[in-house]
Image (spheres, coloured by chain):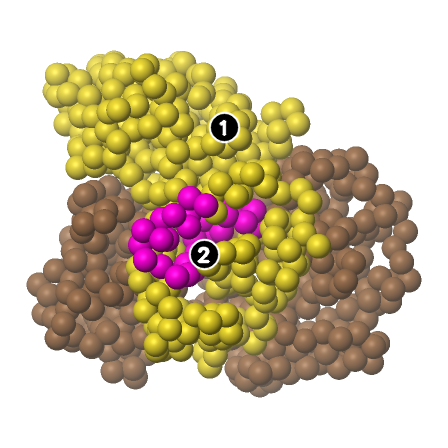
Chain colours: A brown, B yellow
Amino acid sequence: MSNSNPPFSTAEYDRRLAKTRTAMEKAGLDVLFVTDPSNQAWLTGYDGWSFYVHQGVIVTMEGEPIWWGRYMDMMGGRRTCWMHHDNILGYGDHFVQSTEVHPMQDLAQHLTTRGFADARIGVEMENYYYSAKAHAVLGAELLNAELVDATALVNWQRLVKSEDEIGFIRKAAAISEKVVETAINRAAPGVRKNDLVADIMHAGITGVGDDWGDYPAIVPLTPSGLDATAAHLTWNGAPMREGEATFFELSGCYRRYHAPLCRTVFLGTPSDEMRRAEEAQIEGITAGLDAARAGNRTCDIANAFMQVMAKHGIERSGRMGYPIGLSYPPDWGERTASIRSEDKTMLEPGMVFHFMPALWMDSWGLETTETILIREGEPAEPLCNIDRKLFVKS
Amino acid sequence: MSNSNPPFSTAEYDRRLAKTRTAMEKAGLDVLFVTDPSNQAWLTGYDGWSFYVHQGVIVTMEGEPIWWGRYMDMMGGRRTCWMHHDNILGYGDHFVQSTEVHPMQDLAQHLTTRGFADARIGVEMENYYYSAKAHAVLGAELLNAELVDATALVNWQRLVKSEDEIGFIRKAAAISEKVVETAINRAAPGVRKNDLVADIMHAGITGVGDDWGDYPAIVPLTPSGLDATAAHLTWNGAPMREGEATFFELSGCYRRYHAPLCRTVFLGTPSDEMRRAEEAQIEGITAGLDAARAGNRTCDIANAFMQVMAKHGIERSGRMGYPIGLSYPPDWGERTASIRSEDKTMLEPGMVFHFMPALWMDSWGLETTETILIREGEPAEPLCNIDRKLFVKS
């Protein structure tokens, strides 16, 4: 038996598995243990809020992938993964958050049974869900194996999206539009920020028509005034105030696919400085979109934006975006390429980025961003359609 | 300069720091590097959705703790931590998700400057936010230091709550009641699950009166029918159906403090089997609450529950709860003690647990749970007040 209704077709999962195996071969891996929940879902369809305990996907050079996790989550695996039920493995509850035994002992047993006790095993060393302890235990259990860092091996295979994936991201983008419109329309002096966030979340989860909303991998970031000089504050119960800018960093989510979209709302009359920054930012985004085309590199997008900023006398360096798609908390980025001057990733049609040239200044923040699709021979397509400007409500 | 409005008093933060230092001394640590976002917030007040990049708190045997993170998150540190601004450190953006440099190189530099190049340094090896790679880089940078596993050292100090913390959890509990009531009232055949979840989230974030709602560390788990045999599925856009049970695993959140509360709703007429399980579960919870008193141990709660189950011919083993309080995704548990037969943690007044003796059967799931406060000489106090039963709507 297997789940008859995973999000994607068999052909799509076969394609993903084949791409992954090609990369494994190139890296000289016999087997790959995937802990990133996004990679697990991308390969197998697994979907559940169970990544707070150890779990993962075992990919070998043949046969179906194997999902491995807590015994009680095998049921979730059976209901969401496309593989046959005998490729869904569970470990006992006594392993969970124990100081005496560790789930990686169980994993090592399975790998040994399958003949990988002395194999070259790829592990995702830089991932939230593969702890230093997990690595130490796995290494101690498999003394004859070679554990190789395969961080982002699968993530890189996800960089160019299939038509089906782009379809999912377009649905997420429609939800993003609804969510951002809700934020803009509801923002007003005296409105408690948490009440506004409640409406934002309601709009996102309700979704658009039949396209129901899933939870985004990052909660709404909605700081106002001085709080908006910090990039990652969430919200509180204080009322919104006249004379302050609030940025809204939001995303709709459709079946774990994202399309982040940020806009900034000013209540009252913004300063000339902010108006000038707005003008520069919008001009810079247009320049960035133009540079974001197949054949160029990620750094070209960042450089095009920074050149416009420099012309306007605004200093902005650092990271200005990242690929997006399928994700789980705590990050909706794919953690491969970055839009920044040091990054030389060649752009290809079908890549999707959150182009995110936010400005965090000494006394305010201004976020205007787009989720963009890279195309051949023309500027990138912004997948959302919301006016690109500072929204002023007086 | 420092933040004048952290969630707790200076005396409370001093108490926490002193407890932590006592534990450090016992473990023979010169310095402790804390990555768990809950531990960071507990020690310093730091609050932001930035834990998807490397950050942490450095605790030495004297002076204020030091918050260390991404440069752009220093602003968030200054706005949320109680320490002076010169104890908030930031690393450059080129370290973020780079394959060439790693933030732990920057941390090693700071530790070296402060004289800890050859110290005994505690690190949280079993934590989502301390990756295998981070550990490897830190170890390679500090060849003369000894990195010691200090997983949960701070978490254990959090087990007994202060009066102020219990006050926060009571506020969260009031929000939990509102959230669960919303779920029960809105559940009906034909209601799309995502629309119901949208209402649940709206109720939680709106909060109760002046007590605004924060984001819970786990999104609503709301599976129906066969999906409810799996413990950790979230939701989709399918309408609720007559003849199915849906469990709601939910929590209100007040300034990062939680009070999880689960109830199950049946649309139509439940089977006799489910009714008998309901009866047994409620009787078992009462027995568990009675055993949950200062001087007993965590296992006594589990054993009291299982004994009632056995009497009713229902097999239920495994973990039935965990301490709760301050938390960040992906888990609202504190990851120290467990309510299970192998765990012998002595109960003390002021401990707060999510007592969670859910039943996941072959064709349905039944979750009825309580957040409970351990007291001296009497049964634990359930902090929410919602009828303890299977809610049947026909």
Label 2 sits on residue: B61
- Kindly state the secondary structure of the residue where label 1 is placed: helix
The magenta segment is B18-46
Q: Residue A129 in the image: x percent, y percent?
A: 36, 58
Asked if residue B330 can be seen in this view, the reply is no
Asked if residue B111 can be seen in this view, the reply is yes
- The foreground one among B99 and B123 is B123
Which residue shows up at 32% across the image and 51% down it? B26
Q: Residue A248 in the image: x percent, y percent?
A: 68, 52
- Tag 2, which chain? B
- The foreground one among A393 and B352 is B352
Asked if residue B45 is among those painted magenta in the image, a careful observer would answer: yes
Vertical arrangement, residue A40 with respect to residue A5, above or below: below
* Mark drawn on residue A331: none
Which residue shows up at 64% across the image and 55% down it? B84
Q: Amino acid at mark 1?
A: Glu
Label 1 sits on residue: B163
